[in-house]
Image: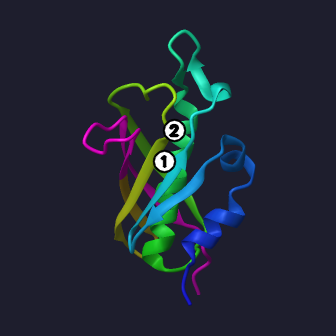
Amino acid sequence: MGFDIRAFATHRFGGHGGRLGITYHDHGEDWAELALPYAPDLVGDPERGVLASGPIITLMDMATSLAVWSKRDRWVPHATLDLRIDYLRPATPGRTVIGRGECYRLTRAISFVRGQAHDGDPEDPIAHVAGTYMNTEVQP
C-alpha cells in the first residue's frame, strides 16, 4: 500500500498549512510539490504586494517533509533539525508559489533534503532550501 501522499495532503493540511491555503500540486518517488496561492493577508510588503517569507518557509518545510515520506514510502515522525532557505528574489505579487522538495538521501536516523520555490518558472526560482530531518520514531 505505502504512503499515499495525495490523500495525506488532502486530509492533513489543517493547522498552519491549511490556514495558509497550501495544497497538493504533484509528486514522485522522492519529491513533492505543493502550491501556496497568493492571498492579500499573506503579504509582507503592502506597498509592493510581495508575500511574506514565513508562508514560503512553511511551504518548503511541508514540501521537503512530504518528499521524505514519499521516499520512505510511509509516514515516519520526524523533527526539522535544519532548514536553510536562501532567497534569490521576491515572489511576484498575484502569483501562486510552487514549492518542490526532494529527499536525496536517507539514513536510519537522518533524512537529507533540498528544494526550490518558484512562481511559474522553475528556471527563475524565488528561493533554494537545504535541510535535514531527524527520524523520531522509536527504534527497537
SS at mark 1 in the image = helix
Q: Is residue 6 above or below residue 65?
A: below
Q: Which quadrant does the N terminus fall into?
A: bottom right
Left/right placement of residue 99 relative to residue 20 reads left
The residue where tag 2 is placed is 56
Residue depicted at x 72% and y 43%: 19
Residue 34 drawn at (x, y percent)? 51, 54
Left/right placement of residue 91 relative to residue 94 reads left
Could you tell me the amino acid type at mark 2? Answer: Ile
Could you tell me the amino acid type at mark 1? Answer: Met
Q: Which quadrant does the C terminus fall into?
A: bottom right
Residue depicted at x 49% and y 25%: 93
Residue 115 drawn at (x, y percent)? 36, 51
Q: Residues within 10 Å of mark 2 (few under 14, many from 20)?
A: many
Residue 127 drawn at (x, y percent)? 37, 37
The residue where tag 1 is placed is 60
Q: Which residues are magenta?
A: 115-140
SS at mark 2 in the image = helix
Of residue 96 and residue 68, the one placed in the foreground of this image is 96
Answer yes or no: do the residues labelled 1 and 2 have beta carbons within 8 Å?
yes
